[in-house]
Image (cartoon, rainbow, N blue to C red):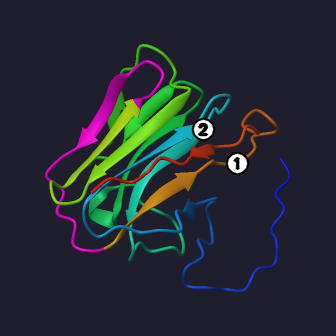
Amino acid sequence: MVTTLHNRPDNPKRFDRHNVVLGKDGFSSGRFYYEVKVKGKTRWTLGVARESIDRKGKITLSPEDGLCVVYLRDVNVYKASTSPHVLLSLREMPQKVGVFVDYEEGQVSFYDVEARSHIYSFTDCNFTEKLYPYFNPSGNAGGKNSAPLIISPVNHTH
């Protein structure tokens, strides 16, 4: 496996050890929803992150550390980042995942868009700062995970 590191300025808003990107727009009220095509991926992580998430060093996937995410590992192992992480039993591999956030209700829900089925919900979250969509396509894995994450724009609702 060959890893190419690009010289980038050290910026407090840049993740230094992971292929993570946050959405451009954050939300501190209301509801928002987005969809991500994950077809062809063998690893990914999707959800929301609080604005103050630590972007340097190892990322701990947990609501206590500012992340409400679900993730795929090893082609067919799906988990939610609760404490401890919960193994999710899905009937089929989602091709597109919908993420719905209700800020005031403290809820983050994940859906298999094409199957029209619920994957998992984080409930009773106490959001106190801006939330951003969180995307980690993971590494290429020698071409096995080279498919892109494709973010579908969906109008945000209040």
Is the C-beta separation of discs 1 and 2 under 8 Å? yes
Q: Residue at x 63, y 29 (%)?
A: 39
Q: Residues within 10 Å of mark 2 (few under 14, many from 20)?
A: many
Amino acid beneath label 2: Arg
Amino acid beneath label 1: Gly
Mark 1 or mark 2, earlier in chain: 2
Image x and y of residue 64, in percent: 27, 62
Query: Where the C terminus falls, by quadrant?
Result: bottom left
Residue under numbered circle 1: 139
Image x and y of residue 46, in percent: 48, 47
Residue 66 falls inside the magenta stretch: no
In this view, the residue in front, 11 or 133, is: 133
Residue under numbered circle 2: 43
Q: Is residue 63 above or below residue 71?
A: below
Image x and y of residue 91, in percent: 41, 13
Image x and y of residue 7, in percent: 81, 78
Q: Is residue 122 above or below residue 105?
A: above
Q: Residue at x 52, y 63 (%)?
A: 23
User: What residue span does the magenta drawing correspond to?
Assistant: 112-129
- Circle on res. 17: none
Which of the 4 image quadrants contains residue 122? top left
Mark 2 secondary-structure assignment: loop
Q: Is residue 14 above or below residue 115?
A: below
